Amino acid sequence: MIMNRVANKAISAALRTTSARTFTTTAPSAAKVAVLGAAGGIGQPLSLLCKLSPEVTELSCYDIVGTPGVAADLSHIPTKSSTTGSLPAPVSWPLRGDGGLEETLKGADIVVIPAGVPRKPGMTRDDLFNTNASIVKTLVEGCAEYCPDAMIAIISNPVNSTVPIAAEVLKKAGVYNPKKLVGVTTLDVCRANTFVANSLGKDPKDVNVTVIGGHAGITILPLFSRVEGATFTDEELEAITVRTQFGGDEVVAAKAGAGSATLSMAYAGYVFTENALKAMRGEDIVQCAYVESDLTDAEFFASPVKFGKDGVEEILPLGELSDYEQSWFDKMLPDLKKQIQKGVDFVNN
């Protein structure tokens, strides 16, 4: 029990010291970031934030439409990173590979994939599966061919399934490295931080909630019991937990069919990417992420992860869960495992 409490405090302290919420000014080494889906609702603000980041020296944008214009627009911003925008190469005979995708991916250190269709009212992340699964599969096939050593950060939903899709594609290509494949769950942390800070009257920058599990509905499990000074009634804890789990639905409903959580997801993707780049150049970084894991009997699981020069360096222990959190954990795990298997089956069947 005492060791679990010590572990919980150590994880919380590590997360607090490595959370990135503002632009930094330290000088980075050269780093190329490729954004696939850069002309979309998430891709454009994500590309903007990456252009502003001092960690990025080359920003390469790719989408099926609009990327030359996005890149031209970004290139006028006075930061030191260069910017390019590519479209798929036209179909030709003899058949050849996608030169636009190759140009985008060659030499990339991190590939961030927000490509896909957004949710609309009444849709779940699972409703997106058939369309987004095919998109992720195709793009990751390109990563396997053109930048097999890059870290791949998946934003495209449903992340619980698209990350396993990416893993199976990379395995088939013989280039799978579990240290370099990550599902971005940072938005769940951002929401949990915001909601709990607002309820406690704190500045969100002074809060860092550990969020474990997956990135959809009840698979999202914020560990509010670890927030120092937080006391909730049973009703308050249930409300803030469910709001964190279904925060995306709140945005979809508010936008009334005009989109999903694009701006906040772009910010979260930027936070993850900048942190991963900092780790690549030697900083100690711990952040929650959805990765191949042996913490549970689910093949992939989101939890605090230490990142290093080669990607995932260490998956930190979960520590002790409260009785309330354990009840959610027990409900969540079977659902998460089904969503993982759905992604595996998509590639292999």
Image (tube, rainbow, N blue to C red):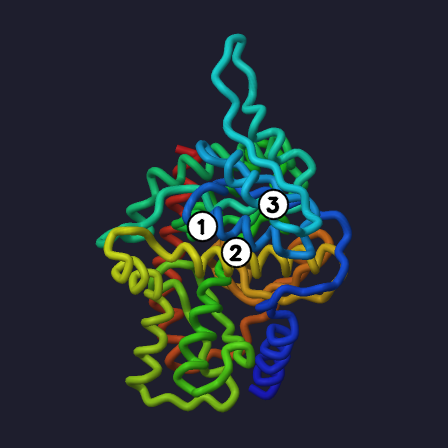
Specify the label residue 97 is tagged with: none
In the rendered image, residue 233, in percent from the top left (x then y), is placed at 33, 89
Q: Count residues near mark 1 (Cα–Cα under 10 Å), then give few for <14, some for 14-19, many for 20+.
A: many
Disc 1 + disc 2, Cβ < 8 Å? yes
- For label 3, the residue is 76
CA–CA distance between discs 2 and 3?
22 Å
The residue that appears at 77% across and 52% down in the rendered structure is: 29
Question: Residue at (45%, 57%) from the top-left corner?
Answer: 265
Mark 1 secondary-structure assignment:
loop
Q: Residue at x 44, y 65 (%)?
A: 188
Q: Against 239, is 201 above or below? A: below
Tell me the SS state at disc 2. Answer: helix
Earlier in the chain: of badge 2 and badge 3, it is: 3
Query: Where is 290 relative to 108, above or below?
Result: below
Residue designated by label 2? 269
**Disc number lying in front (3 or 1):** 3
Q: Which labelled disc corresponds to residue 42?
A: 1
Q: What amino acid is found at the position of numbered circle 2 in the picture?
A: Gly
Q: How far apart are the two marked residues, 3 and 1, measured between alpha carbons?
A: 20 Å
